[in-house]
């Protein structure tokens, strides 16, 4: 493809397209268009102009795709999306005779050039940029527009540091049909989603995957997959798991690693369903990383000011129970530290993986929502510590759910009590890891896709009669215990059934539950 030139073959630099936009310098060149730094002689301000190549403009599909970009971005008003100012096409007296789009001028560099120059970014800066881009893409998705080419080359960093996404050249609405390119994968294969690489329907989850790869590159300094050809790279996105970001950079929090893992999940049921869901976890990860670092500079400082107010963490049951006031007194000396944790803790949203959790080779953690945890006490009179159920899936081993305190340290006459997690829509779990601050209790694992809920006291049915299938017999639970599960079918509900309490305390706590598929 050739860059636009005047009809006589001379350079168009210095020409005033549309009678007002003087082209001053070429700043970018692609297969379909060239981008120029220009000057709006009417409003006397710098602008950027994308001019379509004349030979490309003769193709109806390419021309419509160019027009679509102008229409798409013109609908979007967001501080992190480059603004469209004007559009024109055809002869205008300059001899150029090519369609053009006028954008705001963002002085600075691309995110790609920043990564090439610095290598991996500070963790808080990487999360801040990812959060800005996620918020911009959320706005596009709300207008039913999928970008389809999210990559650091299409992210401009202004002199003040803020990220702005640009180049919606292959964007399309979720309701439009056609305008695919036969034999080609639209988008850059370094960041292409598996479904896009396979030519399958592209949705908002495709942008989520690409943004997850961009975040990986910002954190590690390089893309996860390389190859001799673009097709080789695309097929690696289809067939291979993205390398463990925490293994490549051990100082990352589990919350940050979980965002990358879930955003880049091959299975769409495990990937974030919407950009808003990813934003929630990015906000939490940024707050955690900033608190761990003790500071945040540059753009991260500005983004931190936009985060929701932190929520206070509830005290564990054993510190709220009247019989445990002495334990509270023993912690008075640590009150300052606890208060700091409260202030820095963000709202629990689940979906993370507890620190230091590592699955058996070939297994991967299952991401669970905060609402996934439920108590199950069919042989008792009421719920057990229902308000702290979220603690078992909050990726924080310092918080826990607890049974009640039982007389004589025994569950008798009840056969057991426990909690279950909802892994909707279902998963073949092959292993479960349990973390607890009160080791010494026995626990069995059951699963179900449909079971009977709480019944009046005096329940006589067995768990199997209530709809549960035993996967693993009761085993003694240490501070961190992995239990292998038979991988025969997918289940939605997984029950951790406590059959014996620790011999000394009279209650059992569960801090974290992690399923592996």
Image (cartoon, helix red, strand yellow):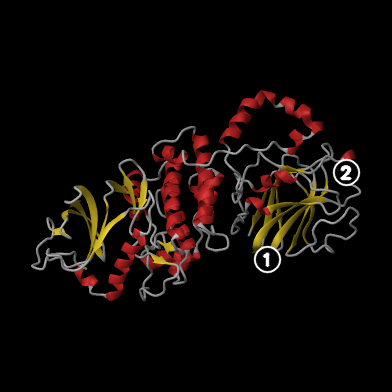
Residue hosting label 1: 490
Asked if labels 2 and 1 touch by Cβ distance under 8 angstroms, the answer is no
- Residue at horizontal 54 percent and vertical 59 percent from the top: 273
The front one of 508 and 516 is 508
Residue hosting label 2: 410
The front one of 328 and 18 is 18
Task: Work out which quarter of the rendered image holds the C terminus and state it.
Answer: bottom right
Where is 184 relative to 146, above or below?
Answer: below
Q: Quadrant of residue 161?
A: top left
Q: Is residue 291 visible?
A: yes
Relative horizontal placement of residue 195, taking residue 451 as reference (left or right): left
Image location (x, y in percent) of residue 218:
41, 48
In the picture as drawn, the residue positioned furthest to the top comes out as 333
Within-10-Å neighbours for mark 1: few <14, some 14–19, many 20+: some
Where is 91 relative to 137, above or below?
Answer: below
Q: Is residue 251 visible?
A: no
Relative horizontal placement of residue 483, taking residue 117 as reference (left or right): right
In the picture as drawn, the residue positioned furthest to the front comes out as 42
Relative horizontal placement of residue 425, taking residue 447 as reference (left or right): left
Q: Secondary structure at mark 2?
A: loop
Task: Work out which quarter of the rendered image holds the N terminus and state it.
Answer: bottom left
Image location (x, y in percent) of residue 369:
62, 53
Image location (x, y in percent) of residue 260:
50, 52
């Amino acid at each position: 493809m050739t860059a636009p030139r005047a009809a006589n073959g001379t350079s168009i630099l210095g020409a005033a397209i549309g009678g007002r936009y003087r082209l001053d310098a070429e700043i970018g060149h692609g297969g379909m268009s060239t981008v120029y730094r220009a000057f709006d002689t009417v409003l006397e301000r710098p602008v950027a102009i994308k001019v379509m190549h004349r030979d490309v403009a003769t193709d109806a599909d390419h021309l419509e795709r160019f027009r679509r970009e102008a229409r798409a971005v013109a609908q979007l008003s967001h501080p992190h999306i480059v603004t469209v100012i004007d559009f024109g096409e055809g002869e205008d007296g300059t001899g150029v005779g090519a369609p053009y789009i006028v954008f705001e001028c963002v002085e600075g560099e691309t995110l790609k050039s920043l990564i090439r120059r610095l290598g991996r970014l500070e963790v808080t800066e990487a999360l801040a940029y990812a959060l800005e881009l996620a918020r911009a893409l959320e706005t596009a998705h709300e207008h039913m527009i999928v970008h389809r080419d999210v990559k650091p080359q299409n992210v401009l960093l202004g002199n003040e540091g803020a990220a702005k996404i640009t180049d919606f050249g292959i964007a399309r609405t979720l309701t439009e049909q056609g305008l695919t390119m036969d034999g080609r994968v639209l988008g850059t294969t370094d960041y292409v989603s598996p479904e896009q690489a396979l030519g399958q329907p592209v949705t908002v989850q495709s942008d989520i995957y690409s943004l997850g790869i961009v975040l990986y590159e910002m954190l590690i300094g390089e893309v996860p997959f390389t190859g001799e050809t673009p097709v080789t790279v695309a097929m690696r996105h289809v067939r291979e798991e993205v390398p463990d970001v925490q293994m490549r950079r051990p100082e990352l929090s589990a919350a940050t690693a979980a965002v990358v893992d879930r955003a880049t999940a091959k299975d769409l049921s495990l990937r974030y369903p919407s950009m808003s869901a990813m934003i929630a976890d990015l906000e939490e990860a940024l707050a955690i990383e900033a608190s761990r670092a003790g500071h945040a500079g540059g753009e991260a400082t500005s983004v931190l000011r936009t985060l929701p107010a932190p929520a206070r963490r509830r005290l564990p049951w054993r510190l709220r129970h009247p019989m445990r006031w002495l334990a509270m007194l023993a912690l008075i000396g640590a009150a300052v530290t606890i208060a700091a944790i409260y202030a820095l803790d963000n709202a629990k949203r689940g979906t993370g993986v507890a620190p230091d959790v590592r699955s058996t080779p070939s297994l991967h953690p299952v991401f669970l929502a905060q609402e996934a945890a439920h108590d199950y006490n069919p042989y008792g009179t009421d719920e057990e510590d229902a308000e702290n159920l979220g603690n078992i899936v909050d990726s924080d081993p310092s918080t826990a759910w607890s049974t009640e305190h039982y007389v004589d340290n025994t569950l008798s006459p009840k056969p057991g009590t426990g909690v279950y997690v909802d892994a909707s829509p279902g998963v073949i779990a092959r292993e479960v890891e349990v973390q607890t601050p009160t080791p010494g209790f026995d626990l069995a694992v059951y699963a179900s896709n449909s079971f009977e809920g709480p019944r009046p006291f005096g329940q006589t049915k067995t768990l199997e009669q209530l709809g549960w299938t035993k996967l693993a017999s009761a085993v003694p639970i240490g501070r961190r215990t992995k239990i292998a599960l038979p991988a025969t079918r997918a289940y939605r509900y997984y029950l951790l059934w406590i059959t014996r309490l620790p011999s000394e305390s009279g209650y059992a706590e569960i801090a974290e539950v992690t399923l592996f598929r």
